[in-house]
Amino acid sequence: MNINDLKLFMAVAFHGNFTKAAEASYTVQSNVTARIKSLEEEFDTKLFLRTSRKVELTSAGETLLHYSKQIINLIEEAKISIGKNDIVNGQIKVGFLETTMAHKGPRIVREMADKFPRIDLHLTSSMRDTLIDSVLNYKLDAAFIPGPVYNEELEQIHVNDERIVAVTPIFVKNLEDLLEQPLMKAIVFDQGCFFRARLEAWLISHNIMNYHKTVINSIEGVVNFIESGIGFSFLPEEMVSTFYSGRKIKTHALPKEIGAVKNALIYRKESVSSPVLKAFISLFT
């Protein structure tokens, strides 16, 4: 076993597919298959359950994934401690809500490029619960989510406070005017969206259990539909004011218990030994 074997193993775990892992690792599938087989022989156990569509980690595989990440982090830390310079190299996988990526992503990329030019960023967007699971399962090194999160395996850093606002067509005068509509019509993301959850909590607080929903998984699409008068939505105030201030829409302040959000950067506690993760965290501490 060597460090490259562990990296190939982690690639298969991340992609859930031998072919994709090979492509991402710039090698051939037969090599990946051979190295995984070698690891399974060395540990005398199956690391993956293979089906015709995908591969999944066994319980032994999950344990090895946990140790593999720590081993690689320690090796990278040793390189910096023993080496002649302290330049941090590597890649970090970071998750965002789509709204956060659109607004905060470019600034983070610029800061990382300025301070740590040898670190490559791999950014992805998803729902809050999916981001948490991906960090717990080592598919992401860190993620920005609306906090707090309660899990003893995770560390979290408060990043910023944010306000959610109701965004309506321009003809809606106020929230009372919105609530008086005979049928509430909302433009929302898929089930699991944090902003949709806040919107539905607000409706329930006003004894509205059912509403007409149009599901669109695009920020631009949500704003376009609101502007056309189809319905309303809940979105981050700063994002709306930054990117959509010239649109024919109106924002309305929400009660603190609905509108206030504390965003956090989360990562696994043991992963803090990673020099790359330490560098990334330094932007926010």
Image (cartoon, helix red, strand yellow):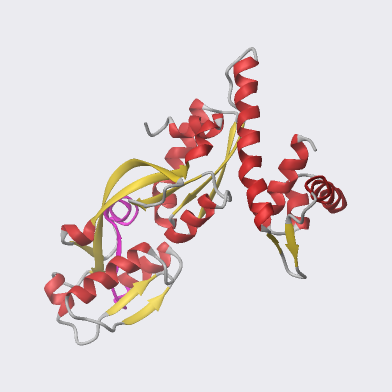
Q: Which of the pair 89/113 is nearer the observer?
A: 89
Vertical order, 264 against 208 (above or below): above
Residue 149 position in % (x across, y down): 37, 52
Residue 127 visible within the image: no
Whether residue 233 is in magenta: the answer is: yes
Residue 127 position in % (x across, y down): 45, 61
Vertical order, 83 against 214 (above or below): above
Vertical order, 22 against 206 (above or below): above
Identify the residue at image location x=20%, y=87%.
182
Identify the residue at image location x=18%, y=83%.
181
Q: Which of the pair 138/24 is nearer the observer?
A: 138
Q: Describe residue 256's horizontal placement relative to residue 226 as left or right.
A: left
Residue 35 visible within the image: yes
User: Which span is picked out in magenta?
Assistant: 228-245
Task: Locate residue 57: give its quadrant.
Answer: bottom right
Residue 283 position in % (x across, y down): 42, 32
Identify the residue at image location x=50%, y=34%.
272
Q: Residue furthest top?
A: 84
Whether residue 174 is in magenta: the answer is: no
Q: Residue furthest bottom?
A: 182
Q: Describe residue 156's horizontal placement relative to residue 233 as left or right.
A: right
Vertical order, 251 against 27 (above or below): below
